[in-house]
Image: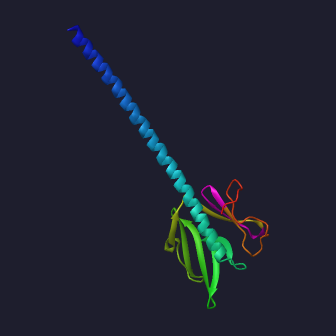
């Protein structure tokens, strides 16, 4: 009987050690999955911020005519205005942040629309426009910033794009 009792204790001890090991492995896997999800979310957010800044930079550079890019408000929302003219009719593109999304609204300048009428472009945490000295415009999406210098008065030796650390972006 002593051998049977000793074998039972050994078996129970081995099972307890195995359960502790299995629980430890499961906890490490859960923590690893959580860290992976957080990292991929941060990377995705960073990619979205870079994508929206690249989108706005491209739009601004394509529409960059003398005095046609400005910052203002569209129904209380900070907005980048890109003005152009077709067949002597003035049109305006409005790029703004509304309801968690970057929106774009293109229409005749005189027509009145609402923020909800714009086309959703990309979902980001935040987007802000700020007019600086010398006609420069700073666009901030999340943690990244873009500095554009429209042809209408910025000095030519300033960078077109930079991030918050001052390194060139784009």
Q: Position of residue 8 (x, y in %)?
A: 25, 16
Can residue 78 be seen from the camera position used here?
Answer: no
- Where on the picture, by quarter, is residue 151? bottom right
**Residue reaching furthest to the bottom:** 87
Magenta range is: 134-145
Residue appearing at x 42%, y 39% in the figure: 29
Q: Position of residue 75 (x, y in %)?
A: 58, 71
**Residue reaching furthest to the top:** 2
- Quarter of the image that includes the N terminus: top left
Q: Nearer the viewer, residue 82 or 44?
A: 44
- Quarter of the image that includes the C terminus: bottom right
Q: Position of residue 109 (x, y in %)?
A: 60, 82
Residue appearing at x 32%, y 21% in the figure: 14
| Number of numbered discs visible in the structure rendering | 0
Can residue 136 be seen from the camera position used here?
Answer: yes
Residue appearing at x 79%, y 70% in the figure: 156
Q: Position of residue 31 (x, y in %)?
A: 45, 39
């Amino acid at each position: 009987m002593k051998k049977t009792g000793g074998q039972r204790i050994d078996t129970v001890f081995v099972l307890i050690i195995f359960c502790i090991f299995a629980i430890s492995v499961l906890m490490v896997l859960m923590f690893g999955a959580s860290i992976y999800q957080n990292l991929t979310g941060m990377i995705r957010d960073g990619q979205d911020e870079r994508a929206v800044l690249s989108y706005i930079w491209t739009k601004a550079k394509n529409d960059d005519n003398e005095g046609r890019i400005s910052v203002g408000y569209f129904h209380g929302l900070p907005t980048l205005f890109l003005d152009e003219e077709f067949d002597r009719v003035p049109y305006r593109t409005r790029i703004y942040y509304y309801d968690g999304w970057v929106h774009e609204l293109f229409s005749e300048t005189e027509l009145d629309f609402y923020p909800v009428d714009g086309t959703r472009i990309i979902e980001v945490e935040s987007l802000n426009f700020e007019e600086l000295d010398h006609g420069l415009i700073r666009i901030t999406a999340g943690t990244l910033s873009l500095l554009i210098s429209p042809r209408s008065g910025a000095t030519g030796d300033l960078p077109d794009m930079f991030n918050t650390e001052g390194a060139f972006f784009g």
